[in-house]
Image (cartoon, coloured by chain):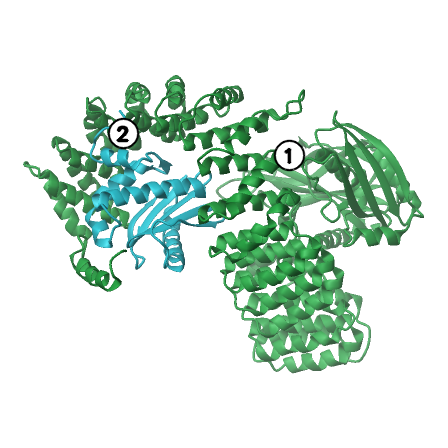
């Protein structure tokens, strides 16, 4: 680098010409490898050929099985040479060629000989090669030597055996576990690396033996650890012991904390970071414990080495998720990192600041981020967009600034994933912050004016169709939508036609104008666009005058498509063109995928357009339609709630059954989703026999058996109960699956004519108070609480007894009431002794309910709770107290 | 696990590429990702100055040494700090073998020795030796001096 640039370039030209591997070609090198077979070996030449082979392998070149075998056999001849340099190359190339099991035998005797050689370095290398290519049977033969090697005086031999042990533990754990005495001895070695490798292996051998790990940690934290690498391992194992042992209850001190804190003053940065991370990750860490670690990390934020800055900001970023206030002190240092050349560091700094900032610093921060966004890659931008979305949900009053920021970056250059992240964020903000709706929709409209991604355009048009008509001035969106019909490709045009129709259906005053626009679409050159326009003109009916749209038409336009798409596809494929038109009612509505899709849903917030806010209700819609199709249940009235599926069988049993509880004012319907997993069986007349003797308020009034249940084609059977109107009756039901089983001939798939009656015991099912509560959130709890007023408020205090933690108590009450936690209050800060949780829901009879729960926990882990309920009906407020009192 | 060690010349051509526990179908992706990372960031960087990046839960530490860019990729216990240790060992071993900061030609001349050094430093994804003097002896099958 010190040479003048020009000179260097000249050099390079020469060098390029003479590169030792110029024009290297696999076939030629394989030819050259024949020198390995020469009776008079030339070590220098052989080493050169091996180097060429290594070069090829390191370039990603592969050898065919025959080529590899040929080279390998030739290489084994080289054991005859006594040349040390060549031998070292031979060890390496054998590992790289990784011969197959049947070839290994050729070299094992040579390697075993080297393993017992008096030359230490032959021993070390032979161990490494043998362990790389060996299988279990050979391992038992060499085990004795390996155990000796672990305690060999030569550290290289010992390390070779120990590292081999770490690898072999994956494939032959029972053999390696027998070496623990030797490994234990090696942990005490004076050689730094031997201790490091031995510690790693010993921990892996004993990781399931808590007591042994604890003893190991106790002795080493008091003894000498000879290398920073080993010290890092020890810190990791110490945190594991701390996690498993918990607080020392007598003194209230955390065992080993002093050791971790001491490591913060170690001379190796690696150890300092490991200790700081261990402290920040302690469960229930107090601010007193956290402070020394944060101070050390803060110092590293201004280090001249990028790796240290990165490590510090990465750790603080994690801390900010759980203890934002602890990181606030570092904000000034963090702000200077926004301009760091390393974009990973800058992004981490930004996202940390977004987590730790308060409402007043948002505007200043946004200004800084704006400059920063233009010169980072999309992947970093996505992280920032997600952080801004969370910030906006945290400070809803700041939506204007944050929404503007999102719309600005939406206009700039960017790839699909980035744009999708922004659009998703805007959609979520529109959903959660009602005030942001109109401006958000306009931003999206402006975006589709110049959007290169068909997928995003169609998704936005769909969303606009659902939300736009409900705004104060729906007409202002029409221009943006119709522009799509004029300017875009057929997919977007078709989506725009559907959106226009939705506006027409919902906003009667716009209907005449929508009609004119739809009529223009009849001349589109794409048949899908024309078909949609024709369809909507007909369904909206009339001649385009200002009339109210039928509810059926609205249902058609806005209702969810309740037929599983897979079923629809199968039916369409099976349909043969004939005089008889395709009948959509003939498509089976077995909701095979529904329980599965719902199982994944809990805990996962619907994200943006991918899962629009209407998703949960659309599942309910699907259920409602399904039940309406059954004549016995048609008179039950409006469905209030459908529960998530409850499994009544263990996983992977012959018959899988889960149940969905449908709650009506006067009735409860159990929908049993059954799957038969035995190909040799066909089940018929499937019904669940329910014993309701432990549910006094319920009386069975109807049941609907499932006629036939072939393998892997789920079906449903239903049982309905009557219950007192509006009363949240609870009870326990025991269930038996009863059916006629028929043998199926596997070759033909035909079932025998005669069947046998059989039964299958299912788990019990309970109807609980939470089944009468709909999870419905409110965006601003404080406003909702105040506007509900104290008229029907009921307040009382409860002792919840000893609990494992405050989190556990909070979760128990939330699931008992079955309500929606608001504003993230279901999360309890890890070391707090009190917590307030806000819940919202709709109780049976469509009564809105709000709950404010205040928890406190004392030293004996006794939890006390104050429950304040406000609702539109005082009897409902009382009912909630009863639920808690009896739960 | 130390997932990969990759060395490339200044044009982005691969000189050494060693993966551990990375599925074959992902290797090409990693190769182009790393080469691009180097092209974007290594211009004007001083020899042996360590740069860092992360991609999901995987860390990358990289640097330049003469004509050669060096990348190490790791996850879990091989975080940015452990990788810095590993890459420092690799750079000092290369300098030692080449006798100075290598040009591409010098690097290729010493290719066999460099492969042996790497073999001593990283063994199937685990860091084995960290001392350059010891490594220098080991590749000549000489026992370490302290022994």
Q: Residue furthest top?
A: A181
Numbered tag placed on residue A288 in the rendering: 1
Q: Secondary structure at mark 2?
A: helix
Quarter of image, res A599: top right
Q: Secondary structure at mark 1?
A: helix
**Badge 2 is on which residue?**
A130
In-front residue for pair A345/A28: A345
Label 1 and label 2: CA atoms lie apart by 52 Å
Tell me if residue A823 comes above or below residue A509 in the rendering.
above
Rendering coords of residue B23 (x, y %): 39, 45
Q: Which subunit holds the residue at mark 2?
A: A
Side of B35 where A461 appears, left or right = right
Residue shown at 71% from the left, 47% from the top: A824
Is A484 in front, or is A721? A484
Q: Viewer-proximal residue, A101 or A541?
A: A101
- Kindly check if marks 1 and 2 are in contact, taking CB atoms under 8 A apart as contact: no
Above or below A300: residue A787: below
Expressed as whole percent of the image width and height from the top left, the position of residue B51 reads 41, 50
Does the rendering let one see residue A46?
yes
Asked whether residue A561 is in view, the answer is no
Residue at 53 percent across and 44 percent down: it is A299
| Left or right: where B116 falls relative to A163 | left
| Identity of the residue drawn at 75% across and 53% down | A624
Q: Residue furthest left?
A: A40
Pinpoint residue B38: horizontal percent, then vertical percent.
38, 56
Quadrant (top left/top right/bottom left/bottom right) for the C terminus of chain A: top right
Q: Which chain is green?
A: A
| Label 1 chain ID | A
Image quadrant holding the N terminus of chain A, namely bottom left
Colour-to-chain, cyan? B
């Amino acid at each position: 680098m010190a040479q003048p640039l020009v000179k260097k370039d000249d050099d390079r030209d020469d060098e390029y010409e003479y590169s030792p591997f110029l024009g290297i070609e696999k076939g030629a090198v394989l030819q050259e490898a024949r020198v390995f077979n020469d009776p008079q070996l030339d070590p220098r030449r052989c080493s050169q050929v091996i180097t060429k082979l290594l070069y090829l392998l390191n370039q990603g070149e592969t050898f065919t099985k025959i080529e590899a075998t040929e080279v390998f056999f030739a290489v084994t001849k080289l054991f005859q040479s006594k040349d040390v340099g060549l031998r070292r190359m031979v060890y390496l190339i054998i590992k790289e060629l990784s011969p197959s099991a049947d070839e290994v035998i050729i070299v094992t005797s040579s390697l075993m000989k080297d393993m017992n050689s008096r030359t230490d370095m032959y021993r070390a290398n032979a161990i490494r090669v043998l362990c790389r290519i060996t299988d279990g049977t050979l391992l038992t033969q060499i085990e004795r030597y390996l155990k000796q090697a672990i305690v060999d005086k030569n550290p290289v031999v010992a390390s070779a055996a120990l590292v081999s042990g770490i690898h072999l533990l994956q494939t032959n754990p029972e053999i390696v576990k027998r070496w623990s005495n030797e490994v234990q001895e090696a942990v005490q070695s004076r050689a730094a690396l031997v201790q490091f490798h031995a510690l790693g292996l010993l921990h892996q051998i004993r990781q399931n033996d808590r007591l042994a790990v604890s003893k190991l940690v106790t002795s080493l934290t008091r003894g000498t650890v000879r290398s920073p690498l080993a010290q890092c391992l020890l810190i990791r194992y110490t945190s594991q012991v701390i996690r498993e042992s918990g607080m020392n209850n007598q003194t209230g001190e955390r065992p080993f904390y002093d050791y971790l804190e001491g490591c913060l003053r170690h001379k190796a940065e690696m150890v300092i970071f490991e200790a700081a991370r261990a402290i920040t990750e302690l469960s229930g860490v107090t601010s007193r414990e956290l402070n020394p670690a944060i101070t050390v990390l803060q110092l590293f934020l201004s280090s001249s080495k990028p790796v240290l800055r990165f490590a510090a900001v990465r750790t603080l970023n994690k801390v900010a998720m759980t203890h934002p206030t602890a990181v606030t002190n570092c904000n000034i240092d963090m702000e200077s990192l926004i301009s760091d050349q390393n974009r990973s560091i800058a992004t981490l700094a930004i996202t940390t600041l977004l987590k730790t900032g308060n409402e007043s610093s948002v505007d200043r921060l946004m200004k800084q981020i704006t400059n920063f966004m233009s010169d980072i890659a999309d992947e970093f931008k996505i992280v920032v967009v997600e952080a801004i979305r969370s910030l906006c949900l945290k400070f809803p009053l700041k939506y204007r600034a944050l929404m503007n920021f999102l719309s600005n970056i939406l206009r700039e250059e960017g790839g699909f994933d980035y744009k999708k992240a922004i659009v998703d964020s805007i959609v979520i903000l529109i959903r959660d912050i009602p005030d942001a709706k109109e401006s958000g929709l306009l931003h999206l409209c402006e975006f589709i004016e110049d959007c290169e991604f068909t997928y995003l355009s169609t998704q936005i048009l769909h969303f606009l169709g659902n939300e736009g008509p409900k705004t104060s001035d729906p007409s202002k969106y029409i221009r943006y939508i119709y522009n799509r019909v004029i300017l875009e490709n057929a997919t977007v045009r078709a989506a725009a036609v559907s959106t226009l129709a939705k506006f027409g259906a919902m906003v009667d005053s716009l209907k005449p104008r929508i009609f004119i626009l739809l009529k223009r679409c009849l001349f589109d050159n794409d048949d899908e666009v024309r078909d949609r326009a024709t369809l909507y003109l007909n369904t909206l009916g009339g001649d385009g005058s200002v009339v109210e749209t039928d509810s059926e038409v609205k249902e058609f336009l806005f209702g969810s498509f309740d037929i599983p798409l897979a079923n629809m596809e199968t039916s369409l494929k099976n349909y043969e063109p004939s005089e008889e038109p395709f009948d959509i009612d003939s498509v089976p509505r077995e909701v095979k995928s529904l329980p599965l899709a719902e199982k994944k849903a809990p805990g996962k917030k619907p994200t943006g357009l991918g899962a629009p806010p209407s998703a949960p209700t659309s599942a309910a819609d699907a259920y409602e339609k399904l039940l309406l199709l059954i004549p016995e249940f048609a008179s039950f009235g409006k469905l209030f709630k459908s529960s998530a599926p409850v499994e009544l069988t263990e996983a992977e049993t012959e018959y899988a059954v889960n149940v969905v509880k449908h709650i009506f004012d006067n009735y409860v319907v159990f929908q049993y989703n059954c799957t038969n997993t035995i190909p040799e069986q066909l089940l018929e007349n499937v019904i669940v026999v329910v014993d309701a003797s432990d549910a006094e308020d319920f009386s069975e009034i109807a049941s609907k058996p499932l006629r036939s249940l072939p393998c892997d084609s789920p079906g449903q059977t239903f049982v309905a109960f009557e219950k007192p109107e509006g009363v949240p009756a609870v009870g326990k039901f025991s269930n038996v699956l009863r059916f006629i089983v028929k043998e199926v001939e596997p070759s033909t798939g035909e079932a025998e004519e005669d069947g046998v009656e059989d039964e299958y015991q299912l788990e019990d099912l309970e109807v609980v108070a939470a089944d009468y509560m709909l999870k419905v959130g409110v965006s601003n709890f404080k406003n909702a609480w105040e506007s509900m007023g104290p008229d029907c408020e009921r307040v009382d205090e409860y002792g919840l007894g000893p609990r494992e933690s405050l989190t556990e108590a909070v979760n128990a009450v939330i699931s008992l009431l079955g309500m929606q936690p608001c504003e993230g209050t279901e999360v309890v800060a890890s070391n707090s002794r009190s917590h307030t949780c806000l819940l919202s829901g709709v109780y049976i009879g469509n009564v809105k309910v709000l709950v404010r729960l205040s928890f406190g926990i004392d030293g004996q882990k006794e939890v006390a709770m104050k429950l304040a309920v406000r609702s539109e009906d005082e009897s409902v407020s009382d009912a909630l107290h009863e639920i808690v009192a009896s739960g | 696990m130390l997932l990969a060690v990759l060395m490339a010349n200044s044009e982005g051509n691969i000189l050494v590429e060693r993966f551990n526990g990375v599925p074959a179908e992902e290797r090409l992706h990693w190769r182009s990702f790393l080469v691009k990372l180097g092209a974007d960031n290594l211009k004007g960087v001083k020899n042996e100055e360590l740069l860092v990046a992360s991609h999901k839960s995987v860390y990358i530490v990289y640097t330049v040494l003469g004509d050669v860019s060096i990348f190490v990729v790791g996850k879990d216990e091989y975080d940015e700090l452990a990788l810095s240790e590993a890459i420092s060992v690799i750079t000092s071993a290369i300098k030692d073998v080449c006798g100075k900061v290598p040009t591409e030609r010098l690097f290729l001349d010493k290719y066999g020795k460099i492969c042996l050094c790497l073999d001593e430093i990283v063994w199937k994804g685990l860091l084995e030796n960290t001392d350059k003097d010891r490594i220098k002896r080991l590749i000549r099958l000489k026992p370490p001096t302290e022994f």
